Amino acid sequence: MDQINNNPNRVAVIGASGYGGLQTIRLLKEHPFFQISYLAGKKTAYTKWNELCPFLYLDDNPTIQPIDIEKIASTSDFAVLSLPNGLSSQLSPELVDLNVRVIDLSADYRYRSLDQWNKIYTKETEEDIRNDYDLCSSAIYGLPEWNEQNISKAKLVASPGCFPTASLLLLIPFLKQGLIENDGIIIDAKSGTSGGGREPKEHLLLSEASESICPYGVIGHRHTSEIEQELSLVSGTTINLQFTPHLVPMVRGILCTVYARLRDPCLTAEDCKTVLEAIYRDHKSIEILPVGTYPKTKWVRNTNKALLSVQVDKRTGRIVLMSVIDNLLKGQAGQAIQSLNLMSGQSSESGLPLNSYYP
């Protein structure tokens, strides 16, 4: 904003006009506790917000500012960074040093090891050389249902990717309890086109994506290693899995179907449902569906809800786990607000939409 905001819970949104930034601003605008203190962008700098985004009206019609670390620090207690991979790491070290608590929506701090990030994000590594090893190792992985205490004290939270969120919510309970085998895990995931961001891309054009469904990143998708990292930490052993994403001709939503082999072939679907219910009973963003009811992406659209479902195939000894989330909310901005809530001492779901507008 043009004036410094004296509210002690001031939030800057950097990368304001991208999909992640837009969702974050919408949630903050309606939040009972936080106040937007600074909007920044690169291509949209010096543009009035209401002229750029008349569909998301802000009363004071702020001017989008250039990215200026000193101004962010002087106006804000928190900064949500919704920026391309590689750019957040150019800002976060200085922001943290200036006592701004950061929630990063990119992949820059999702890996505990900077060497691992360099290995996976090779294109970004070529453009900018990073040396923030300590910040990488100290950043907190922002999956609120599993890292609440660490998030509440964090200086820097790395929000998970949308595919990892939908996958980890399913797999962590069963790996942590030792109920499934560590090897042979298969994740089949499907995402709407908004997962590709707001920048124009040929394969996301209506004439390219409509009336079609296709796999992509079949071998070596970047989110594979992120999922494997978190599951390896939970299980205490190296996890290697198969992950295949698909592009579906819809705007929002992720459907994730996971296949794993049960250690105890006597376990029923009801037993496995009870496991999920016990673990997530205090988490309002997670709902466990009855056995035989399978989730639809439309049921969670425009909400921070994750719907989970489980089935067991006695013939093969496999468990089939299913989840749906809105990739822009529980898979991105909504989950970031969950972390922001925890960092400011509020309940995780404060100010977040949990009921869908159906149909």
Image (tube, rainbow, N blue to C red):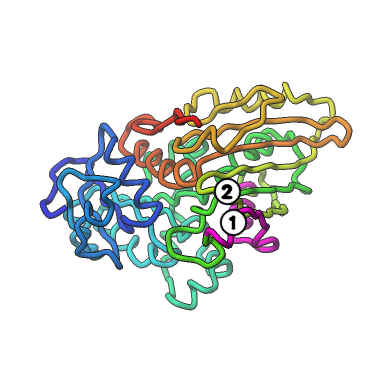
User: Would residue 218 be counted in the magenta stretch?
Assistant: yes
Residue 164 bears which disc, if any? Answer: 2
Residue bearing mark 1: 223
Residue occupying image coordinates x 50% and y 55%: 110
- Res. 245 visible in picture: no
Disc 2/disc 1 C-alpha distance (Å): 6 Å
In the rendered structure, which disc, 2 or 1, sits on the residue that comes first in sequence? 2
Residue occupying image coordinates x 35% and y 50%: 22
Q: Residues within 10 Å of mark 2 (few under 14, many from 20)?
A: many
Left or right, 28 with respect to 208, comes to left
Left or right, 198 with respect to 193, comes to left
Left or right, 61 with respect to 297, comes to left
Q: Position of residue 300 (x, y in %)?
A: 51, 35
Residue occupying image coordinates x 21% and y 61%: 47
Snapshot quadrant of residue 335: top left
Task: Decide: is 180 above or below 19.
Answer: above
Instruction: Indicate the amino acid at tag 1.
Output: His
Q: Seen from this angle, which residue lies furthest left?
A: 3
Q: Residues within 10 Å of mark 1 (few under 14, many from 20)?
A: many
Residue occupying image coordinates x 67% and y 43%: 235
Residue 308 bears which disc, if any? Answer: none
Region rendered in magenta: 206-231
- Nearest the camera: 108 or 113? 108
User: Would residue 314 be counted in the magenta stretch?
Assistant: no
Q: Position of residue 224 (x, y in %)?
A: 63, 56
Asked if the residue at tag 1 contacts the one at tag 2, i.e. Cβ–Cβ closer than 8 Å, the answer is yes
Figure label count: 2
Q: Position of residue 19 (x, y in %)?
A: 40, 53
Disc 2 on helix, strand or loop? helix
- Res. 267 visible in picture: yes
